[in-house]
Amino acid sequence: QEGSHRLPSSQCMVVLLGSTSVGKSSLAYRYVKNDFRDSLPTVGCSFFTQMLNLEVASIKFEIWDTAGQEKYHSVCHLYYRGAHAALLVYDITNKETFNRAKLWLRDLEKEFLPDEILIALVGNKTDLAGEREVATEEGEEFARTKGLLFMETSAKSSHQVNDTFMAIAQELLQREREEASHHGLLTADLEESRTGTRCC
Amino acid sequence: MAADVHKKKGWEVPNGSLAPGDGQHAERSESPTPGLAQGTEPGAGQEGAMFVHTRSYEDLTSPEDGAAAARSPEERRGEPAELTSMEQISKDFSELSTQLTGMALDLEEEMRQSKEGKLEPSPQTTRRDSVLSGKEEEDVTMDAWRMHRKHVFVLSEAGKPVYSRYGSEEALSSTMGVMMALVSFLEAEKNAIRSIHADGYKVVFVRRSPLVLVAVARTRQSEQEIAHELLYIYYQILSLLTWTQLNHIFQQKQNYDLRRLLAGSERITDNLLDLMAHDPSFLMGAVRCLPLAASVRDAVSTSLQQAKAKSLVFSILLSGNQLVSLVRKKDQFLHPIDLHLLFNLISSSSSFREGEAWTPICLPKFNSSGFFHAHISYLEQEMDLCLLLVSTDREDFFTVSDCKRRFQERLRRRGVQHALQEALRTPFYSVAQVGIPDLRHFIYKSKSSGLFTSPEIEAPYVQEEEKERLLGLYQYLHSRAHNSSRPLKNIYFTGPRENLLAWVRAVCSIWVSLSSLVLHGRAVGEWHNTGVAPSPCAVLLGVSLHPCAREGWAGIAVGAGELRHRGLCHVLL
């Protein structure tokens, strides 16, 4: 249980957070099914799994897609707990959603120690660049000051969606390696840690 | 397990009927009895207390800002106390056995924001803005808006709009203010408004503190039926929030804008109203069964039963709005209303088609103060077969998810998937299978099991308006049969386009539409002709009672046969 945050080797729990209608479900759907469709507001949470095979390891992403609606916020807290990574999603055409993402970050910071969870700030809907309200630099700058990964995506046009998850996987593996060498251990035996990493 | 639902002692009521009798107010019971008894729902007990609560018309209609400004001194003083009680709420919530998901944090935050003078994000911006909803907000000043056959409004006791079927709530705030004024005016006289009948319209009021529900209808429904639909809307709101939470919110802040919490869920309520306009389930207070061979259903039920977990209370398999199988924990009963709300939730969202959903849901007739957690998923992409697993533990996602896997595996091992797929291809049977000439359509309801069967609606009820007309006729019969001052057991109704027959007994009821060419004598004869038992109920279920009926009733027997599997048989004996 303790090690699950440090050794995201075979299973990696990712939670998608953000306001209503920023495209959390669409991002998950694009990544898992490589397809896009307009979706209705998510009810509660949805759970997806997706395997990612890298040279050094294969990672099973467990993706929690949460509802942006207020009444479900308290449920979302549940999925923070075991998460290895969080995607803070905002809509680049809606400044308010960017501000909400900052609030989500505050929540996460309350819940986790700084190196316990990998957080990525994701500005979605780059296909609607004409209506942009949040400049790329603004997102970038905020991510830099807070030490977050940053990415702008479009679930609709499939822009950088895979890259986002790939970056998360790489970063987690990197952290894991550092962690292991820091403790003077060999690189974690992925096969061995496969058992018992499930956190829920 | 499914079958013994109905053999339990708790289900046996002296008069043989499990539903409260017409017009009778049944004792409040923990077990979900089919049928909706007035006065047993949460909040009903408060009716006596509400009369002290009155407000001036100005308060109700004055704009939000003005009211806020006028009240601000008290509010400011009250705020610290409110916050502490908020904490108390959040503590209370976490102590609830069914694990409420509290709203306290969000409320607290909102109050902080309003103190800072920051504007709340308008719920309007997120409301029904989904591309798929395909609905533009209507202009409430247009004639088209006025032409809708039924309007439904929900407002808070402060006169704040909560929901409107058509048009934006904001544009309707003054209309809703007037509605609240009407309610309050009569309450001040220690009276309660129920309905207004004028010019072909019925305006029906249902008061469930802290909400007021109003319908403005031009349908043929009786006042009671419209009120019954409004209650469903009330339960729908409870299923999202719980009664406890709803009350806490309004105790803390009387002029709270509930649309904030309901944002994104309006389509669920919209869908419920659409369903009620087309589906006789709600009128019957029963659930429709998918026609299925008993052996297949047995296998499905057993598989469901075997895939159990400690926290699992109900396992439900459904297709469209038809029940395939329901397995419940011992001594736990699911009320048809709760089941309807679950069906509605599933049919109103396409998002369940992907992945596995895990959502808090309150089943108001079961327990209006807490949330269950529902695991919702479709068994296979292209199959319209949805599995609903209701758990008491919100932490149990993976356990419940594993139940699904186990269920699917057992289904495979029993080799019933193919048969199930076949059955899904023909989810309705034809009325012609029954073989009775001039029989156009019927509904057979078993009151004890809360289930009904009905053939596909065929000619002449092909067009949408004809279908609605048929349902309207059933509604008319139903309201006549269940008229509280003069209930009827047998009705033969000769209309210009069809003849209708209603046969209502304690254990079951039958509603039939026959061609208008059938003469009264023949129609009744048809039903009594069986000789052995002059009850259509027996005829329906005893295929071999009458030689002529052997072929004739086979179709209904198909439907009834599958009902029988659901524990209906004791009705016959």
Image: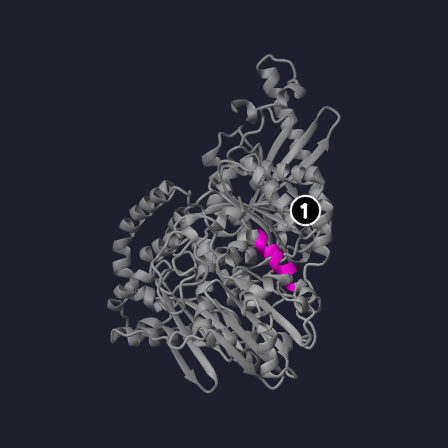
Would you say the magenta stretch is mainly helix, strand or loop? helix
- Label 1 marks a residue whose chain is A
Q: Position of residue B336 (x, y in %)?
A: 49, 57
Give the SS element for disc 1. Answer: helix
Q: Is residue B40 above or below residue A42?
A: below
Q: How is the image coloured?
A: one colour
The residue closer to the viewer here, B319 or B165, is B319
Q: Residue at x 30, y 65 (%)?
A: B47
Q: Position of residue B475 (x, y in %)?
A: 52, 74
Q: Quadrant of residue A66?
A: top right
Q: Is residue B562 above or below residue A147?
A: below
Q: Do we see residue B60 in this rendering?
A: yes
The residue closer to the viewer here, B112 or B418, is B418
Amino acid type of the residue that numbered disc 1 sits on in the rendered structure: Tyr
The residue closer to the viewer here, A160 or B238, is B238
Q: Disc 1 marks which residue?
A: A29
Q: Is residue B113 above or below residue B272?
A: above
Q: Position of residue B437 (x, y in %)?
A: 69, 75
Q: Residue at x 64, y 82 (%)?
A: B518
Q: Which residues are magenta?
A: B556-565
Q: Residue at x 27, y 49 (%)?
A: B81
Q: Position of residue B154 (x, y in %)?
A: 43, 67
Whether B560 is among the magenta residues is yes
The residue closer to the viewer here, B262 or A196, is A196
Circle 1 packing at 10 Å, graded few (<14), some (14-19), many (20+), is many
Whether A143 is among the magenta residues is no
